[in-house]
Image (cartoon, rainbow, N blue to C red):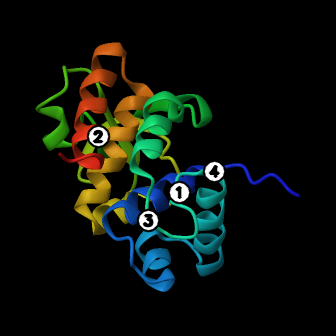
Amino acid sequence: MEQKSLRAADLGVALRLEHRPDEHYEDLAGALGLSLSASHRSVQRLQASGLLLPGSRRVNRSALLEFLVHGARYAFPPSLGAEVRGVPTAGSLPWLGEQLPKGLDAVWPSADGSVRGPALVPLYGGSPAAALRDERLHRSLALVDALRIGQARDRKIAEALLRKQLLPE
């Protein structure tokens, strides 16, 4: 049996399904900027990895949190570049920047962006456009980026915020 390794776009799918588990594949694909077949394959990889509950499209929240906190920055290492115009992520997103120490600014390069900052290659190509369409997804992806590029203190803050979102009391 062929091993199905996770791809970066799969995290976008998991984070979208986290707050829209019953979304139709067509809507999921459109929201994330993926093809219909890519969204199907992504769900299959997420199920095989245990990040979705068996036989469903419901997110295994504790497993997703564990993977994001401890594995995302190794599986999908960040690539930072020169200052560009783009969509804010990590500390450049005002909501998150208020809670993180200064210096964790980054943007996903995009002509649709509204701020300037150090370029961070997004988890997958559709992240900037998908984030502009879905504020909750934008916050989630920004938290993942804070986990990917931040120092220990930044990662602890991002982990606490992500934990609150994924495992509400």
- Which of the 4 image quadrants contains residue 154? top left
Image vertical order of residue 137 relative to residue 93, above or below: below
Q: Mark 1 points at which residue?
A: 125
Label at residue 163: none
Q: Mark 2 points at which residue?
A: 162
Q: Is mark 1 on a helix, strand or loop?
A: loop
| Residue type at the position of mark 1 | Gly
C-alpha separation, residue under disc 3 versus residue under disc 1: 24 Å
Image vertical order of residue 65 relative to residue 79, above or below: below
Asked if residue 50 lies left or right of residue 154, the reply is: right
- Mark closer to the observer (2, 4): 4
Q: What element carries label 3?
A: loop
Q: Mark 3 points at which residue?
A: 58
How crowded pointer 4 is (Cα within 10 Å; few <14, some 14-19, many 20+) is rated as some
User: Sequence-wise, which precedes: disc 1 or disc 2?
Assistant: 1
- Could you tell me if the residues under marks 3 and 4 are in contact, i.e. CB atoms within 8 Å? no
